[in-house]
Amino acid sequence: MKVLVPVKRVVDANVKVRVNADNTNVDTANLKMAINPFCEIAVEEAVRLKEAGVVSEIVVVTIGPKAAQEQLRTAMALGADRGIHVETDDEFASLSIAKMLNAIQNQEQAQLILLGKQSIDGDNNQTGQMLAALGNMPQATFASEVKVEGDSVIVTREIDGGLQTLKMPMPAVITTDLRLNEPRYAKLPNIMKAKRKPLDTVTVESLGVTLKQHQNIVKVAPPAQRQAGVMVASVEELVEKLKNEAKVI
Amino acid sequence: MAILVIAEHDNATLKLDTAKVVACAQAIGADVDLLVAGDDCSAVVDAAKQLTGVRKVLVADNAVYGNGIAENLGDLLVSIAADYQHMLATASSLGKDVMPRVAALLDVAQISEVVEVVSEDTFVRPIYAGSALATVQSLDAVKVMTVRSSAFDAVANDGNAEVVSLDGVFNSAVEFVSQTLTKSERPDLGAASVVVSGGRAMGSADNFAILEQLADKLGGALGASRAAVDAGYVPNDLQVGQTGKIVAPDLYIAVGISGAIQHLAGMKDSKVIVAINKDPEAPIFQVADYGLEADLFDAVPKLLELI
Ligand SMILES: Cc1cc2nc3c(=O)[nH]c(=O)nc-3n(C[C@H](O)[C@H](O)[C@H](O)COP(=O)(O)OP(=O)(O)OC[C@H]3O[C@@H](n4cnc5c(N)ncnc54)[C@H](O)[C@@H]3O)c2cc1C
């Protein structure tokens, strides 16, 4: 069984980003970049399914600039077998990304598509669901447990009130939540090996999908800053302030 | 043209979030209809029709909609989309699950976590864990969006909307297996006016008992950082942050939480923030109105005594 894992290059989760001077975007120049944490969890899950003998091939795909090949190599160092790079310097709405991924899935015919529930830059949380809709596949979002049983997959999802378990036929789309697994660190020999794994570079045009512009970014602004607060010296002072100054208790 | 709001409920009670999303819809303008899709959900319909300013409540009451499965709920939404220029849901696990599907099937983009309405086609939404706010203009004919309910004030309950049944029944290949919902007598995280959250420093599930007592004394909800959830001290649905719940209560008390950007993303719009942490350098103090540098195991019991 084949698994397709789409991944994204994003600013590292530990880096604080700032809005640029002309308020058109965040300034990402010279920031440390990394594979989106949720995508990394998706790769790890695919690798675990392969180690368990359920999966035979893991294909990772990314849509992004030349440098995004680093993230494909990272995924291959973790255990993915080959990579597909749709090279582009343009930024796309989630729907366009989903259309491109759907075209790739039509070629690859994977049984399972595992991807992060959101990327920590746009925080959209859309691509997996859109891909499922376009490919007429069932979806299980926010997964914290994945079990393959025959032609079906059973997924436990983190929902607002607790946990929900769904069963669905494959091919299916699963988006990963934080508690699905804890990704391993790539070992040096595997990083070396990953450099020799096959990586195909293709253009957006070669996918044969029609894309359009859906949105204009009017501006990007920093959020309002909170007024600096005070340090209180004791619990007594805290309670006094909450009662008499803030009037919230 | 009109706006459709998808009601958030558990088949028995309508969530307060829906009244907040209706407020967002009213900021856009035009007539507002509500969709209640569920199973045996007449009590929800009764509550929904009272929301101020709602024109019609569309009801799809059928067992297939009982568990909020994205596939068939999405199909139901697409079947009525022609009547609407905007389709809004709460940015809840349900809204996030279903709205991107609806958007893709309609060949339009989806706008996530709207916090402000600029005009009928232009909206503000946070990106990068709230480090920036993007103002986005939609070029699509139908605007499909999820709304961050904490950014809007709920509408009142003096309406009396017309109720219309929908008879479309859509099935899906997805089978519901089971559900474990966290039972709690406390208010919903999203609806509480006080939230008491604990972090990694709580050290164990048992130690969370002192925060539960504090929450109960203040009539508030319990929350947690990701580290506390990952460690298994509390269930996943208590996580506050970029990838958990977004809250904006009158009072947020962060206990033994360092204040990582991903946590701040979920609570920094609270009216009053209190932080209790033994590290004076903890970043949580930068957003706190009242900071107390103390060991939580001394401070919280004392706090319990004094309030
Ligand atoms: C993709 C991604 C998404 C994430 N999403 C979220 C999210 O939604 N929500 C979230 O919360 N986090 C999220 N995180 C994790 C986040 O980065 C932090 O790791 C997490 O919030 C830390 O939790 P904490 O503050 O409880 O733990 P720590 O950072 O370990 O802080 C513990 C604090 O307790 C203090 N302390 C220790 N002992 C005591 C004591 N006895 N008394 C008082 N204070 C004490 C310490 O000084 C410290 O400040 C995410 C991370 C990533 C990468």
Image (cartoon, coloured by chain):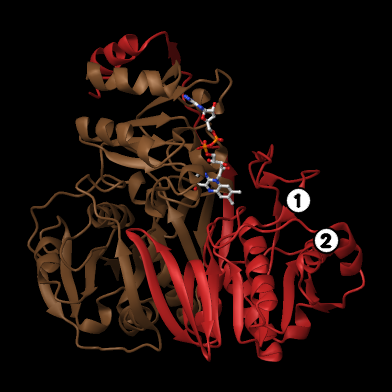
Check the image and report above or below for B271 versus A26.
above
- Classify mark 1: helix, strand or loop: strand
What residue would you read off at disc 1? Answer: A33
| Chain letter, colour red | A
Q: Tell me the subunit letter for badge 1.
A: A
Position in image of residue A14 (x %, y %): 67, 42
Task: Give the tally of numbered discs.
Answer: 2
Which corner quadrant holds the C terminus of chain B?
top left
Among numbered discs 1 and 2, the one appearing first in the sequence: 1
Which corner quadrant holds the N terminus of chain B?
bottom left
What residue would you read off at disc 2? Answer: A70
Q: Tell me the subunit letter for badge 2.
A: A
Q: Colour of chain B?
A: brown
- Classify mark 2: helix, strand or loop: helix
Say what amino acid the circle numbered 1 marks. Answer: Met
Q: Which mark is residue A7?
A: none
Nearer to the camera, B156 or A188:
A188
**Same subunit under labels 1 and 2?**
yes
Check the image and report above or below for A166 versus B247.
below
Position in image of residue B51 (x %, y %): 15, 57
**Horizontal side of residue B90 vs A64, given as left or right:** left
Report whether residue B265 is seen: no
Please identify the quarter of the rendering in which residue B250 is found: top left
Please identify the quarter of the rendering in which residue A62 is found: bottom right
**Horizontal side of residue B54 vs A99, given as left or right:** left
Position in image of residue A28 (x %, y %): 73, 46
Within-10-Å neighbours for mark 2: few <14, some 14–19, many 20+: some
* Residue at the image position 27 percent from the left and 54 percent from the top: B17
Position in image of residue A139 (x %, y %): 48, 78
Within-10-Å neighbours for mark 1: few <14, some 14–19, many 20+: some
